[in-house]
Amino acid sequence: MTHSDIEVLEQDGVMIAVLGIEYDNLNEDQLSAASDLLLTLAKSNEPARLLLDLSRTRFFGSGMLGVIFRVWNRVSTRGGSLAMCCAHGVVADVLKVTNVERLWNLYETQEDALKGLND
């Protein structure tokens, strides 16, 4: 299933959201659509296990980090888990600088992330 620029897959009981290329803080409609979809996915599984695949994503700003934080909050309050994988370039730098690995597991590959979420 594809929604806006996010492709949604399910594998081994994990909802996978393959994010699009760019999430600019100035594009409020895009951030709102991404937020709505990801928050829906965060409550669609029991237990909630959500993987954000960043392999296509070249940029996101603080607005998208805020969206991801809200999604993580929804997942974690339901006893679930959130992970991210395949971050590269500027996106990997943003995640590193903000120390999000303290909240979310970051994996090099989708396969590693799926294993981590299913352990």
Image (tube, grey):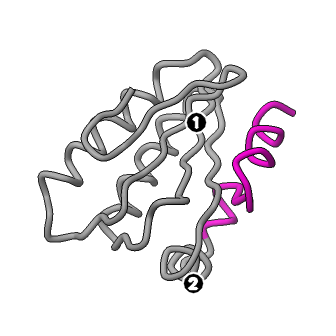
Q: Residue 2, which numbered label?
A: none
Among numbered discs 1 and 2, the one appearing first in the sequence: 1
Q: Could you tell me which quadrant the C terminus lies in?
A: top right
Q: Is residue 92 above or below residue 76?
A: below
Classify mark 1: helix, strand or loop.
strand
Magenta segment range? 100-119
Residue that carries the numbered disc 2 in the rendered image: 97
Residue that carries the numbered disc 1 in the rendered image: 50
Name the residue furthest top.
Answer: 46
Majority secondary structure of magenta residues: helix
Q: Residue at x 64, y 20 (%)?
A: 47
Q: Could you tell me which quadrant the N terminus lies in?
A: top left
Q: Crowding at label 1, few (<14), some or many (≥20) Cα neighbours within 10 Å?
A: many
Could you say which is closer to the camera, residue 101 or residue 85? 85
Question: Which amino acid is tagged 2?
Answer: Val
Q: Is residue 98 above or below residue 56?
A: below
Q: Is residue 97 left or right of residue 35?
A: right
Q: Residue at x 76, y 37 (%)?
A: 117
Residue 108 is covered by the magenta coloring: yes
Distance CA(mark 1)–CA(mark 2) = 23 Å
- Percent coordinates x, y for residue 6 in the rendering: 36, 43
Residue 76 is covered by the magenta coloring: no
- Percent coordinates x, y for residue 87 in the rendering: 59, 67
Could you say which is closer to the camera, residue 58 or residue 15? 58
Q: Residue at x 30, y 44 (%)?
A: 35
Q: Is residue 8 left or right of residue 22?
A: right
User: Based on the displayed image, in which of its 4 quarters is residue 36 positioned?
Assistant: top left
Q: Nearer the viewer, mark 1 or mark 2?
A: 1
Classify mark 2: helix, strand or loop.
helix
